Amino acid sequence: DTEVTQTPKHLVMGMTNKKSLKCEQHMGHRAMYWYKQKAKKPPELMFVYSYEKLSINESVPSRFSPECPNSSLLNLHLHALQPEDSALYLCASSQVPRLAASYEQYFGPGTRLTVT
Amino acid sequence: DAKTTQPNSMESNEEEPVHLPCNHSTISGTDYIHWYRQLPSQGPEYVIHGLTSNVNNRMASLAIAEDRKSSTLILHRATLRDAAVYYCILRDRGSGNTGKLIFGQGTTLQVKP
Protein backbone atom coordinates (compact mmCIF):
# COMPACT_ATOMS: atom_id res chain seq x y z
CA ASP A 1 0.00 0.00 0.00
CA THR A 2 1.69 3.20 -1.19
CA GLU A 3 -1.19 5.49 -0.41
CA VAL A 4 -1.29 8.64 1.64
CA THR A 5 -4.83 9.58 2.58
CA GLN A 6 -6.01 13.04 3.54
CA THR A 7 -9.31 14.10 5.07
CA PRO A 8 -11.38 16.03 4.41
CA LYS A 9 -11.07 16.54 0.65
CA HIS A 10 -12.65 19.98 0.87
CA LEU A 11 -13.08 22.32 3.82
CA VAL A 12 -14.76 25.70 4.09
CA MET A 13 -14.21 27.56 7.34
CA GLY A 14 -14.78 30.99 8.76
CA MET A 15 -12.01 33.11 10.20
CA THR A 16 -13.09 32.37 13.77
CA ASN A 17 -13.41 28.61 13.35
CA LYS A 18 -11.10 25.88 14.58
CA LYS A 19 -10.65 22.89 12.29
CA SER A 20 -8.13 20.11 11.70
CA LEU A 21 -6.71 18.41 8.63
CA LYS A 22 -5.77 14.77 8.90
CA CYS A 23 -3.18 12.72 7.03
CA GLU A 24 -2.51 9.00 7.32
CA GLN A 25 -0.04 6.54 5.84
CA HIS A 26 0.69 2.87 6.49
CA MET A 27 3.97 2.49 4.66
CA GLY A 28 6.08 2.55 7.81
CA HIS A 29 7.49 5.96 6.89
CA ARG A 30 8.96 7.92 9.78
CA ALA A 31 9.20 11.27 7.95
CA MET A 32 6.03 13.25 7.25
CA TYR A 33 5.49 16.65 5.68
CA TRP A 34 2.94 19.42 5.24
CA TYR A 35 3.00 21.58 2.12
CA LYS A 36 0.81 24.49 1.07
CA GLN A 37 0.00 25.09 -2.60
CA LYS A 38 -1.69 28.20 -3.94
CA ALA A 39 -3.37 28.09 -7.34
CA LYS A 40 -0.91 27.79 -10.26
CA LYS A 41 2.07 27.88 -7.88
CA PRO A 42 4.44 25.11 -6.76
CA PRO A 43 4.02 23.46 -3.36
CA GLU A 44 5.74 25.23 -0.47
CA LEU A 45 7.09 23.28 2.47
CA MET A 46 5.53 24.15 5.83
CA PHE A 47 6.60 21.50 8.33
CA VAL A 48 8.70 18.34 8.50
CA TYR A 49 8.37 15.63 11.14
CA SER A 50 11.05 13.04 11.61
CA TYR A 51 10.48 10.16 14.04
CA GLU A 52 7.36 11.99 15.27
CA LYS A 53 9.36 15.07 16.23
CA LEU A 54 9.12 18.43 14.49
CA SER A 55 12.39 18.95 12.63
CA ILE A 56 11.52 21.86 10.34
CA ASN A 57 9.08 24.76 10.70
CA GLU A 58 9.43 27.04 7.69
CA SER A 59 8.46 30.14 9.68
CA VAL A 60 4.78 29.24 9.44
CA PRO A 61 2.35 31.49 11.38
CA SER A 62 1.18 30.08 14.70
CA ARG A 63 -2.42 29.86 13.46
CA PHE A 64 -1.18 26.63 11.83
CA SER A 65 -0.31 24.02 14.46
CA PRO A 66 1.02 20.63 13.37
CA GLU A 67 0.83 17.46 15.42
CA CYS A 68 2.21 13.97 14.87
CA PRO A 69 0.47 11.73 17.44
CA ASN A 70 2.04 8.52 16.09
CA SER A 71 4.13 7.28 13.20
CA SER A 72 1.12 6.87 10.89
CA LEU A 73 -0.78 10.07 11.56
CA LEU A 74 -0.15 13.74 10.92
CA ASN A 75 -2.58 16.50 11.80
CA LEU A 76 -2.67 20.19 10.98
CA HIS A 77 -4.76 22.23 13.41
CA LEU A 78 -6.15 25.48 12.04
CA HIS A 79 -7.33 28.44 14.07
CA ALA A 80 -8.17 32.05 13.21
CA LEU A 81 -7.15 31.69 9.59
CA GLN A 82 -7.21 34.49 7.04
CA PRO A 83 -8.74 34.38 3.54
CA GLU A 84 -5.21 34.37 2.07
CA ASP A 85 -4.67 31.00 3.75
CA SER A 86 -7.07 29.46 1.24
CA ALA A 87 -5.04 26.87 -0.66
CA LEU A 88 -4.49 23.17 -1.28
CA TYR A 89 -2.78 21.56 1.72
CA LEU A 90 -0.70 18.54 0.82
CA CYS A 91 0.65 15.87 3.10
CA ALA A 92 3.57 13.64 2.16
CA SER A 93 5.61 10.87 3.75
CA SER A 94 8.90 9.17 3.09
CA GLN A 95 11.55 7.03 4.67
CA VAL A 96 13.84 9.17 6.76
CA PRO A 97 16.58 10.40 4.41
CA ARG A 98 20.13 9.40 5.16
CA LEU A 99 23.49 10.78 4.08
CA ALA A 100 24.06 7.96 1.60
CA ALA A 101 20.54 7.73 0.23
CA SER A 102 17.59 9.83 -0.79
CA TYR A 103 14.05 8.60 -0.82
CA GLU A 104 10.96 9.56 -2.72
CA GLN A 105 8.12 11.36 -1.00
CA TYR A 106 4.61 10.02 -1.42
CA PHE A 107 1.97 12.72 -1.58
CA GLY A 108 -1.69 12.61 -0.70
CA PRO A 109 -4.34 14.22 -2.91
CA GLY A 110 -4.59 17.23 -0.65
CA THR A 111 -7.30 19.12 1.22
CA ARG A 112 -8.77 22.11 -0.62
CA LEU A 113 -9.26 24.77 2.06
CA THR A 114 -11.37 27.87 1.61
CA VAL A 115 -11.38 30.51 4.35
CA THR A 116 -14.36 32.88 4.26
CA ASP B 1 19.21 25.96 -1.12
CA ALA B 2 20.50 25.50 -4.67
CA LYS B 3 18.10 26.62 -7.39
CA THR B 4 16.87 25.02 -10.58
CA THR B 5 15.79 26.64 -13.84
CA GLN B 6 13.26 25.01 -16.15
CA PRO B 7 11.34 26.20 -19.22
CA ASN B 8 7.83 27.34 -18.30
CA SER B 9 6.14 25.08 -20.84
CA MET B 10 6.80 22.47 -23.50
CA GLU B 11 4.70 20.64 -26.05
CA SER B 12 5.01 17.10 -27.30
CA ASN B 13 3.16 14.79 -29.63
CA GLU B 14 1.72 11.58 -28.31
CA GLU B 15 3.97 8.51 -28.60
CA GLU B 16 7.06 10.64 -29.23
CA PRO B 17 9.97 11.02 -26.79
CA VAL B 18 10.10 14.11 -24.58
CA HIS B 19 13.26 15.68 -23.17
CA LEU B 20 12.62 18.02 -20.25
CA PRO B 21 15.71 20.09 -19.38
CA CYS B 22 16.76 21.47 -16.01
CA ASN B 23 19.66 23.77 -15.22
CA HIS B 24 21.20 23.72 -11.76
CA SER B 25 24.51 25.52 -12.16
CA THR B 26 24.93 26.09 -8.39
CA ILE B 27 24.51 22.42 -7.50
CA SER B 28 26.77 21.17 -4.73
CA GLY B 29 28.40 17.80 -4.45
CA THR B 30 25.89 16.75 -1.83
CA ASP B 31 22.71 17.56 -3.80
CA TYR B 32 20.49 14.83 -5.17
CA ILE B 33 18.49 15.67 -8.31
CA HIS B 34 14.82 14.76 -7.94
CA TRP B 35 11.99 14.94 -10.46
CA TYR B 36 8.33 15.02 -9.49
CA ARG B 37 5.27 15.65 -11.58
CA GLN B 38 1.83 16.91 -10.71
CA LEU B 39 -1.16 15.92 -12.77
CA PRO B 40 -4.18 18.22 -12.71
CA SER B 41 -6.10 18.07 -9.43
CA GLN B 42 -3.65 15.61 -7.85
CA GLY B 43 -0.77 15.73 -5.41
CA PRO B 44 2.79 15.58 -6.77
CA GLU B 45 4.07 12.18 -7.84
CA TYR B 46 7.67 11.00 -7.64
CA VAL B 47 9.25 10.29 -11.03
CA ILE B 48 12.96 9.63 -10.56
CA HIS B 49 16.08 10.83 -8.78
CA GLY B 50 19.84 10.54 -9.12
CA LEU B 51 23.15 11.81 -7.82
CA THR B 52 25.84 11.43 -10.47
CA SER B 53 25.04 8.57 -12.84
CA ASN B 54 22.21 8.30 -15.32
CA VAL B 55 19.17 6.50 -13.93
CA ASN B 56 16.34 4.55 -15.48
CA ASN B 57 13.07 3.34 -14.04
CA ARG B 58 9.72 2.24 -15.40
CA MET B 59 8.49 5.82 -15.75
CA ALA B 60 11.43 7.69 -17.20
CA SER B 61 15.17 8.14 -17.58
CA LEU B 62 17.33 10.79 -15.97
CA ALA B 63 20.41 11.96 -17.82
CA ILE B 64 22.85 13.94 -15.67
CA ALA B 65 25.57 16.05 -17.25
CA GLU B 66 29.12 15.14 -16.36
CA ASP B 67 29.61 18.42 -14.45
CA ARG B 68 26.17 17.96 -12.84
CA LYS B 69 25.16 21.50 -13.73
CA SER B 70 22.22 20.27 -15.79
CA SER B 71 20.00 17.25 -16.18
CA THR B 72 17.32 16.01 -18.55
CA LEU B 73 14.24 13.99 -17.78
CA ILE B 74 13.39 11.70 -20.68
CA LEU B 75 9.92 10.27 -21.22
CA HIS B 76 10.45 7.67 -23.91
CA ARG B 77 6.94 7.66 -25.36
CA ALA B 78 4.66 10.44 -24.21
CA THR B 79 1.03 9.61 -23.58
CA LEU B 80 -1.86 11.95 -22.89
CA ARG B 81 -1.62 10.90 -19.25
CA ASP B 82 1.87 12.43 -19.08
CA ALA B 83 0.45 15.96 -19.41
CA ALA B 84 1.46 17.52 -16.09
CA VAL B 85 3.72 20.03 -14.39
CA TYR B 86 7.21 18.55 -14.05
CA TYR B 87 9.40 19.78 -11.19
CA CYS B 88 13.17 19.43 -11.04
CA ILE B 89 14.30 19.70 -7.42
CA LEU B 90 17.65 19.57 -5.67
CA ARG B 91 17.64 17.85 -2.31
CA ASP B 92 20.62 18.56 -0.13
CA ARG B 93 22.12 15.30 1.04
CA GLY B 94 23.72 17.34 3.77
CA SER B 95 20.32 18.37 5.14
CA GLY B 96 20.40 15.25 7.24
CA ASN B 97 17.16 13.55 7.92
CA THR B 98 14.87 16.43 7.01
CA GLY B 99 14.05 15.36 3.45
CA LYS B 100 13.48 18.99 2.59
CA LEU B 101 12.29 19.53 -1.02
CA ILE B 102 12.13 23.03 -2.45
CA PHE B 103 9.91 23.10 -5.55
CA GLY B 104 10.70 25.53 -8.38
CA GLN B 105 8.16 26.78 -10.91
CA GLY B 106 8.32 23.62 -13.01
CA THR B 107 7.61 22.91 -16.68
CA THR B 108 4.04 22.46 -17.87
CA LEU B 109 4.06 19.67 -20.43
CA GLN B 110 1.26 19.52 -22.98
CA VAL B 111 0.86 16.32 -24.99
CA LYS B 112 -1.01 16.56 -28.28
CA PRO B 113 -2.82 13.57 -29.74
Image: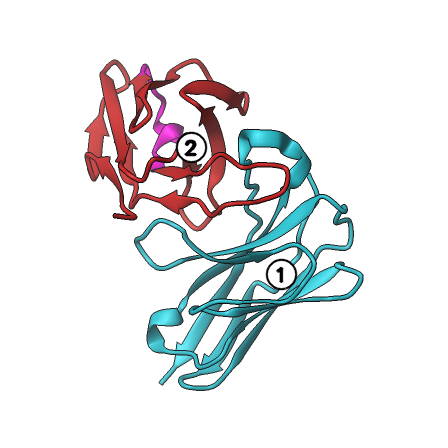
Chain colours: A red, B cyan
Q: Disc 1 residue type?
A: Gln
**Image quarter of the N terminus of chain B:** top right
Please say if B26 is above or below B108: above
Q: Point out residue A104 in the picture as x, y percentages from the top left corner.
A: 47, 48
Q: Nearer the viewer, residue B76 or A76?
A: B76
Residue range of the region highlighted in magenta in the rendering: A79-88
- Determine crowd level at label 1: few under 14, some 14-19, many 20+ residues with C-alpha closer than 10 A: some
Task: Measure the C-alpha gap from mark 2 to mark 1.
Answer: 25 Å
The image quadrant that residue B79 belongs to is bottom left
* Viewer-side residue, B98 vs A64: B98
For the C terminus of chain B, the image quarter is bottom left
Give the left or right position of residue B67, taking residue A13 as reference.
right
Q: Is residue B73 something one can see in this rendering?
A: yes
**Badge number at residue A33:** 2
**Chain under numbered label 1:** B
In the rendering, at what x and y percent does residue B58 appear? 43, 69
Q: Is residue A86 magenta?
A: yes
| Horizontal side of residue A99 vs A81, given as left or right | right
**In the image, which disc is placed on residue B37?**
none
Residue toward you, A95 or B99: A95
B50 vs A68: above or below: below
- Local SS, label 1: loop
Secondary structure under tag 2 reads strand
Within 10 Å of disc 2 (Cα), the crowding (few <14, some 14-19, many 20+) is: many
Residue at image mark 1: B6
Q: What residue is at 34 percent from the left and 76 percent from the top?
A: B80
Who's the residue at 43% across and 68% down the image?
A: B59
Where is residue B9? Give x, y as percent: 53, 67
Amino acid identity at mark 2: Tyr
